[in-house]
Image (cartoon, rainbow, N blue to C red):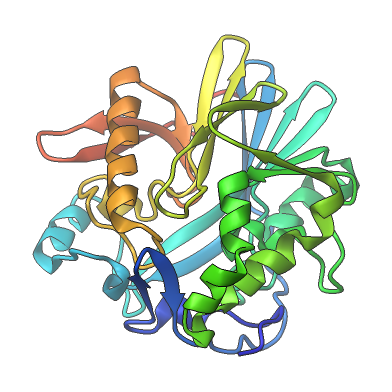
């Protein structure tokens, strides 16, 4: 399979288009996406955490089919959906993809980079959001990656293979980097599944001369501490922002479906490289967030994706922050 800027959509919608075998992500051949992403309007939301200004940049939406959930139970899903306004379509639940710009002092820090045109015409708006803010990509000083899936790293690289953020240092977990650059692991999966490895390598390649690999819980940039959150990928990482006595946790892909996974934390998805560890990490973070009253945001929590976790008799619930929060 040839991987380029116009592939990688079919695995998200075909049934069952993805599976996990021996802890490694496998996906069937992806479908061709016809044409580059064009015309998506910028959608963003801003708020303050201490001295930091945070902008949530909506990259777009993708369908998450029910066949991609392990342990999916239609009756339980319908009960969860009945509590809100989420709608199940023939393609599944529409989930957002979000990136974040954090402005702190003279630093502009990006957390994840969206998809660019890697994942179809309903995504790719993150760059338009930066343009709408008047932010030039050359102004980004640091990019913190939660992990190297294409909906998080795709926007790092331009169509000609050059770095979009020409002056940015790229920060990523060493475990994550080594996993996607391990030729033996890539060779061990079916050829049709190697696209994720090729994509991961392609998107980060222009940053190898300004790359910082991190390990464990570590201070990474102005006010940010990296938190290992393994499972979804081996080096999946969250980032805690501390500013002016306030905290905000960017927890990446701990949750993919706001409607279902707060209520049913054991429901993993086919793109989790280690489902058992994913569920354990999710339980740990949901418990911590509820116990500590953490303010958090996540790449796939319903836009603008800012809120807290509430403990329920069974499972958890998500409490979204009001839109005027932090203004």
Single out the residue that lies furthest toward the top.
245
- List x then y, in percent, for residue 191: 53, 86
- List x then y, in percent, for residue 188: 48, 76
- Quadrant location of the N terminus in the rendered image: bottom right
Asked where in the image residue 217 lies, by quadrant, the reply is top right
Pick the front one: 53 or 30: 30
In the displayed structure, 150 sits above or below 320; it is below
- List x then y, in percent, for residue 281: 34, 41
Could you tell whether 59 is left or right of 81 in the image?
A: right
In the displayed structure, 198 sits above or below 137; it is below
Who's the residue at 48% across and 43% down the image? Answer: 298
For the question of whether residue 17 can be seen, the reply is yes
In the displayed structure, 24 sits above or below 222; it is below
Who's the residue at 62% across and 48% down the image? Answer: 99
Asked where in the image residue 79 lies, by quadrant, the reply is bottom left
Who's the residue at 65% across and 73% down the image? Answer: 198
């Amino acid at each position: 399979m040839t991987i380029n800027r116009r592939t990688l959509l079919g695995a998200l919608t075909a049934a069952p288009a993805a599976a996990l075998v021996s802890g490694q992500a496998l996906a069937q051949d992806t479908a061709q996406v016809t044409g580059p992403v064009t015309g998506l309007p910028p959608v963003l939301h801003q708020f303050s955490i201490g001295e930091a200004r945070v902008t949530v940049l909506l990259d777009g939406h993708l369908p998450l089919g029910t066949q991609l959930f392990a342990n999916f139970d239609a009756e339980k899903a319908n009960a969860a959906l009945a509590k809100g306004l989420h709608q199940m379509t023939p393609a599944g639940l529409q989930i957002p993809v979000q990136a974040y710009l954090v402005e702190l002092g003279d630093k502009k820090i990006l957390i994840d980079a969206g998809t660019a045109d890697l994942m179809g015409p309903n995504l790719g708006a993150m760059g338009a959001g930066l343009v709408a803010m008047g932010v030039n990509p050359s102004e980004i000083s640091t990019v913190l990656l939660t992990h190297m899936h294409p909906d998080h790293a795709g926007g790092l690289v331009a169509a000609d293979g050059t770095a979009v953020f020409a002056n940015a240092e790229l920060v990523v977990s060493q475990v994550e980097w080594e996993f996607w650059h391990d030729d033996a692991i890539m060779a061990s999966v079916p050829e049709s599944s190697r696209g994720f490895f090729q994509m991961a390598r392609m998107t980060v390649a222009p940053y190898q001369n300004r790359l910082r690999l991190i390990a464990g819980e570590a201070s990474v940039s102005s006010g940010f501490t990296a938190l290992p959150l393994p499972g979804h990928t081996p080096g999946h990482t969250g980032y805690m922002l501390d500013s002016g006595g306030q905290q905000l946790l960017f927890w990446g892909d701990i949750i993919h479906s706001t409607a279902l996974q707060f209520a049913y934390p054991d429901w993993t998805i086919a793109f989790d490289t280690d489902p058992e560890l994913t569920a354990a990490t999710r339980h740990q973070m949901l418990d911590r967030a509820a116990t500590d009253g953490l303010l958090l945001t996540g790449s796939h929590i319903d836009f603008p994706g800012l809120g807290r976790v509430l403990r329920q008799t069974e499972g958890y619930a998500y409490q979204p922050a009001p839109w005027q929060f932090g203004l």
